[in-house]
Amino acid sequence: MTESVLDRQTNRAVEQSQPKDRIRRLVWKIAFATLLLMAIGSATRVMNAGLACPDWPLCYGEIVPTQQMNLQVFLEWFHRLDAALIGISAIALTSLSWWNRRSLPTWLPWASTFALGLIVFQGVLGGLTVTELLRFDIVTAHLGTALLFFITLLVIGTALTPYQGTGTANKLPWIGLLAAVLVYLQSLLGALVASRWAVHQCLEASQLCTVMHSHIAGVVPPTLATLTAVFLSWRTPALHPALRQLANMAGGLLILQVILGFATFRLHLQVEPLTVAHQAVGAALLGSLVAFTVLAVRDRATSSV
């Protein structure tokens, strides 16, 4: 009798965990595709391919413009293809979350819906970047929304990841949150520099130098905040290994990002792969800090139980 009750409870727990596991795997796949999408978007910009497809949502009036296909057209076309696949995946994520809402955390369907809203808005901005001929404010908002969508996915994925905290995070959630916010703002400023070609304008015509110098000076606050998070993680006894690994990852990505930024500036943005890597590593740094913050919050919640 007791064994049958235990078996039913075990089966019920397994059934409830299956939708959660499927959704978690889907979220991480979408997050990776989003990181790839931002890297391709950066490559599209530095290769001057943003208007390679003069119309939207089709490209030269076709789904696959085989006759006009070259490197620039391919970059813009593939960027749109990846965005469309992410949009379909976001619809699937939202549908699964609402369909299985009774066996999922109550916040998950709403978070998925928020993510879907962001990707719809992102699609509108993507169309406007073409129809408005790469207007700098729209291009900046386009990247900012992509990063916000990326952050939302990481929050969902990290919150759904199995984790047993040690209750030693203390102030790490606040430090991680501060670092993540500062890196996000610095990324927006970097997008503004890129969309206005501020480096070229300043070096060649002494214009928009304030924008460029603001981005350079803006490196300091997120660097200090990230290093503080790394230092406190090293100094915190019995900290969960996952938190320590994420802190070390953020520190390594920060160093790499500073090196890439310096090299990109010194070479006057003439080496396209460096510029693309600079944005991709910046997004990865932001992602590591977001995951670190979410786990630190969960860790701190353990100590209050």
Image: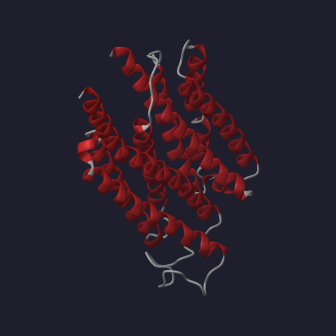
Is 130 placed left or right of 235 in the picture?
Answer: left
Residue 214's image quarter?
A: top right
The residue that appears at 44% across and 76% down in the rendered structure is 56
Residue 77 horizontal/vertical position (percent): 54, 72
Is 23 placed left or right of 188 in the picture?
Answer: left
Residue 33 horizontal/vertical position (percent): 52, 56
| Whether residue 269 is visible | no
The residue that appears at 67% across and 33% down in the rendered structure is 252
What is the image's colouring?
A: secondary structure
* Residue found farthest to the bottom: 67
Is 152 placed left or right of 204 in the picture?
Answer: left
Residue 254's image quarter?
A: top right
Q: What is the count of numbered marks?
A: 0
| Whether residue 55 is visible | yes
The residue that appears at 36% across and 21% down in the rendered structure is 301
Vertical placement of residue 225 versus 268, above or below: above
Quadrant of the frame with the N terminus = top left
The one nearer the camera, 238 or 110, is 238
